[in-house]
Image: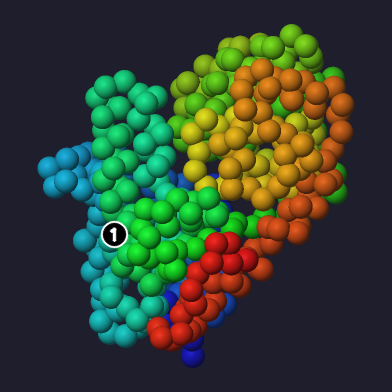
Amino acid sequence: MKDGLLFLAHRIPFPPNKGDKIRSFHLLRHLAERYAVHLGAFVDDSDDWQHAAQLQAWCASVKLVPLHPLRARLASLSGLLSGDALTLPYYRSATLRRWAGELARDGTVTRGLAFSSAMAQFMPKLPTRVLDMVDVDSDKWTQYAPTQRWPMSWVYAREGRKLADWEARVAADFDATLLVSDDEAKLLQARVPGARGRIGAFENGVDAEYFSPERPYPDPYPAGIRGIAFTGAMDYWPNVDAVSWFAERIFPAVREAVPAAQFTIVGSRPAEAVLRLARQPGVVVTGSVPDVRPYLAHAACAVAPLRIARGIQNKVLEAMAMACPVVASPQAAEGIRAAAGRDYWLAPDEAAFAAAVIERLRTGDRNPQARAGILARYDWGRNLAALDPLFDAPPSARPVLEICPA
């Protein structure tokens, strides 16, 4: 009989159709091979309820709690009175707290994994508690602040400070804290030096068989078009900012040099600001699509023009796995173990971005070297196996974490 493990996630980890859910799903599936997983998670998208039953394939029990974003935003304002980061009351749930506590008290679970710093508030005292913080989210809020007008600039700056305090507190409290890259782990280690040996990283992976360039994908681009693809959830503000910057400040120069260029924004729930971009000649907004692979397979290049980013960009890894040439900003490339100029092209400013994209459009070459790098460095099975000692070893023998243990 498998030992019980409590898995807490801020968003239902299925289907794995966006960055955090890709990571949480693979982590859940890996742990389910070794433990009886009891999953507690929020559901913030009504479309995801239809997938709830599929989680039974990996879980001994499932507790899903509805999260209504508007109500949650209003509830988060209580943090202004309590002094907490607004993220914490956004996710607060007495139901989830009681459920997790009961599993711990009756001995059903002896190990726990909290996915994201917000879920640490629900983790009961257990012999083994691991936090996958994924990203140092506080730094993202700090990056947001200067881009906003008052009062939101003040709110975001405050959230950066308060969430950093919470991240430091839980990193000091948990037995191990994991992040998605060396850079994220080093940042947290610097902030919490007393927990340095309990802070490490495990990298994401890519399903390289699924993201294979060898299949005969249908071409979604009109004849004669030179496609430039961006993939991602298009209600996520850093993605909205990225495509807006590219479409408004970079793409006009690209289209002037290559009139057949088309910038295709592929992703669900496009914000109004994204939909407006489709008024610009050569810009197409698809909305949700059943499969992003054809857009990468037939694009002349993929772009990742993010100006605000944390952690690892799955969109970059997936495009590289498809042997699609990638042009990325320094923020989008941060933490990715790949060589600029070989595995992808780094573009630090608007002029460099336009020049790199124009070159990719004109050459039309694929990039099999990028796929080779993904196969060598971003294998889910190998990277996840590095976590097993954290859960298997007794407290007296837990390993000291190293940067990038995989």
Secondary element at tag 1: helix
Question: Depth check: 11 or 20 in front?
Answer: 20
Question: Depth check: 252 or 233 in front?
Answer: 252
Residue 362: x percent and y percent?
A: 85, 22
Check the image and tell me how it is coloured: rainbow
Q: Is residue 124 left or right of residue 53?
A: left
In which quarter of the view is residue 161 placed?
top left
Q: Residue furthest top?
A: 256
Q: What residue is drawn where x is 50% and y is 38%?
A: 309
Q: Return the residue at label 1.
A: 169
Residue 201: x percent and y percent?
A: 53, 61
Query: What is the quadrant of the C terminus in the image?
Result: bottom right
In which quarter of the view is residue 153 placed?
top left
Q: What residue is drawn where x is 87% and y is 26%?
A: 363
Residue 36: x percent and y percent?
A: 47, 79
Whether residue 294 appears in this view of the structure is no
Q: Is residue 2 above or below residue 238?
A: below
Q: Is residue 87 left or right of residue 175?
A: left
